Amino acid sequence: MTAANRVALAPGLYFLATPIGTARDITLRALDILASADVLAAEDTRSLRKLMDIHGVALDGRPLISYHDHNGAKTRPALIAALEQGKSVAYASEAGTPLIADPGYQLGRVAREAGHLVTAAPGPSALLSALTVSGLATDSFFFAGFAPNASGQRQSFFRGLAEVPGTLVFYESPNRVAKSLADMVKVFGPEREAVMARELTKKFEEVCRAQLGELALQMSERKLKGEVVLLVARGEEAALDEEAVRNMLKDALKSHSVKDAVSSIVQDTGWKRRDVYQMALTLEKE
């Protein structure tokens, strides 16, 4: 049990990240804001009440307003009116970080344009958790949200991302994973590394990593449950030959330290860091 503190909040809109599975993943600051805000709003009021009960945060007669994609236009004016009255408003998604494939964008935009404070209490995110455990490159990534339902539209959607120079991250419903992976194979090819991360932070957390073709085959034979994140490694660019990389590294070493020169070449060429580093050491000896 975590005891939340009532704190003095400046008038404004506070976006709160909530746990994606384990209730104890909520931050102490988020609990303090939940205990102190004048008005509470949530994508799912039942989920927020349950979370508050777990952590001993009392509602104390404060309004708890449902706000989601389907009622946003109708509900938003009441929340903006509360801000106009100098109140603090806390908004939480059902799970994870607001706006990241979750409601909140229009609310934040309208509040900001009206001159109100808009801030965040960061915390859990399935996107970042999946990247952390995936084993795929995290120096550059692109979050694409949910792909379209229809196969043809989904393949077109994937084709638009084929040349993105970073790890691709998608949210997906468990009953569409196999179909999405099959379409990914058609667009990205069967050899790119890919990951299926499911039920992150929960009891049955699972992370499966394989080449796309193999992962698609594995998932076609299973019935999945729970929240799913799919990740696909960046595409491989045409490799530069050793002589070209050596010349680039020579130029970089004229004005940079070994560490900075190696980092620059790795980023520009996609070569493995250890190979570029060994080349740099050889050039220095020469």
Image (cartoon, rainbow, N blue to C red):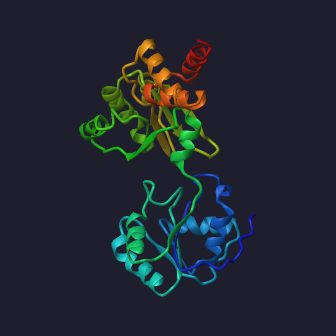
- x, y percent for residue 140: 47, 39
The vertical placement of 207 against 51, above or below, is: above
Q: Residue furthest front?
A: 254
Quadrant containing the C terminus in the rendered view: top right
Residue depicted at x 47% and y 65%: 43
Residue 62 or residue 225, whichever sits in front: 62
Q: Is residue 173 visible?
A: yes
The vertical placement of 79 against 50, above or below, is: below
Quadrant containing the N terminus in the rendered view: bottom right
Residue 210 or residue 248, whichever sits in front: 248
Quadrant of the rendered image containing residue 36:
bottom right
* Left or right, residue 150 beside residue 243: left
- x, y percent for residue 2: 74, 65
- x, y percent for residue 4: 71, 71
Quadrant of the rendered image containing residue 167:
top left
Residue 179 or residue 76, whichever sits in front: 76
Residue 269 or residue 71, whichever sits in front: 269
Residue depicted at x 51% and y 37%: 139
- x, y percent for residue 264: 50, 31
The vertical placement of 115 against 181, above or below, is: below
